[in-house]
Image (cartoon, helix red, strand yellow):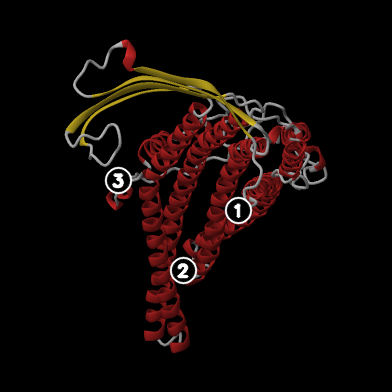
Amino acid sequence: MRVHLLAAAVGMTLALAACASSGGLRPDGTPINPNSLKSEQSLPNVTVSPAAWPQNDWWKSLGDPQLNSLIAEALQDNPTLAEADARAREAQAESGIADSARKPTVNVGGSVQEARIPTTIPKIGNGHNETFKYADVSFNWNLDLWGGERAAWQAALGQQRATEVDAQAARIELSANVARAYVQLGYAYEDQDVSAAELKRASDVLALTQQRVNAGIDNDVQLKQSVSEVAAAQGEKAFADREIDAARSALSVLLGKGPDRGIDIARPTLLPPNALDIPADLPVELLGHRADLVAARWRVEASAKDIKSAKTQFLPNVNISALAGMAMVGGGNLFQGKSTFYDAGPAFSLPIFDGGRRRSNLDSKDAEYDLAVAKYNETLVRAVNEVSDDNDALASVRIQIGAQQRAVDAASDAWTLAEQRYQAGIGSYLEALSVRQELLVAQKRMAELHAQQADTDIQLIQALGGGYRPNQAAPDAAASAAEANSRSLINHS
């Protein structure tokens, strides 16, 4: 007897020693503390305002009803939004599946079968057909002693929220892209006007030069130069026409419509700059105003929950199950007392050896956490630098516009004087047309700068979140707090 007890004790000791273990496995990723991303020196001359965040309908402040209508149409009909919404619904369903896995289940079943039992089966085989009737109710409940099922549900819920935020991010990006394409269309029309004026000017110069050559005043060198200018102006005009078609096509795609939709868009008025102040405490506050950062934070939290769930798979588990029903062979009444049966009780399980499956699963979850943290850190660093870079670009283009305005004014004055000289008989019309070219070049550059300013303004609005307002409580804004939370989730088991 003692030998049997000793063998059992040794066997139990060896089994426990061989139990699957999670020892030595942990993630390495650490979310960046946003307070460490300094931006004061990069934004030294920027007005700081806590109320400077864009509104969720920021484009309406530009005062263009056609733009308002186009963005509303895109938000309704663009197929990429339908794709994002479908992903959100899929994630919601996955969250529901994970939630149901931690709840008790009750099933009802039954069957009626006929079989011929051969005489070779002792006691019950008589060589005749018999009817088997069966009905049962089963109950099963995983007690989830260590919270693994709950953690798995919370992870799925975090992924669901991240996907829902992704859908909002897609709407923000779409509205910004429509506005930018609209700006490009307006500039394309301006460029077309300048190109048409330049073509007319070059054609007038060619006509005058031809007359002077015929009169023996100029030679063929001047004529060839004039022909070259006309050809170049024709190319610029064709390019400007193509830019209008391209902008219309881009808007058609964004609206989710065919190419004819772009043709129906009226010529835009040039959008005024929509200058924004930089909000206070930019790196920290940015976390709650950018959808991509909120989504990335949710994915970090979800990965931490996945790690907790994976760790509980190494621990003992208790499951309660019960089965009750009725069974009968033959044509009697199934619903009678002697046909009933039942079975109920707890079941205990402890993983001993699984070939390393659980450790590999936990190692995979650790890697997924590190990946989510790296993606979050990358998104945070990019977001802060996008705001700074867009602000620098706006400051630069404003300086360029100021300088270019002086160039336009000087060229305009020169054109006025040249016209006055021609009308007074002092200068020639050919000389005046040469001055006119300088004005057209200056105006073309000014239109480019205005388009660049409007486009950069929209990019800054998008960098500041594009008016994003979370519908649900987002993870902790401060990454340090979120890091501590994630670590506690990972280490608690």
* Residue hosting label 2: 429
Q: Determine the image quadrant of residue 111.
A: top left
x, y percent for residue 198: 44, 65
Callout 3: few (<14), some (14-19), or many (20+) C-alpha neighbours within 10 Å? few
- Give the vertical position of 83 relative to 344 (above or below): below
Q: Nearer the viewer, residue 455 or 73?
A: 73
Mark nearest the camera among 1 and 2 is 1
Question: Disc 3 and disc 2: Cα gap in Å?
Answer: 40 Å
As drawn, the label of residue 458 is none
Residue under numbered circle 3: 264
Dots 1, 3 in contact, CB < 8 A: no
Q: In which quarter of the image is residue 288?
A: top right
Q: Which of marks 1 and 3 is nearer the N terminus?
A: 3
Image quadrant in which the C terminus is located:
top right
Q: Can residue 47 be seen in this view?
A: no
Which mark sits nearer the N-terminus, 3 or 2? 3
- x%, y% of residue 27? 73, 46
Image-based side of 118 in relation to 490, left or right: left
Residue position for label 1:
409
Which of labels 3 and 2 is toward the front? 3
Secondary structure of the residue carrying numbered label 3: loop
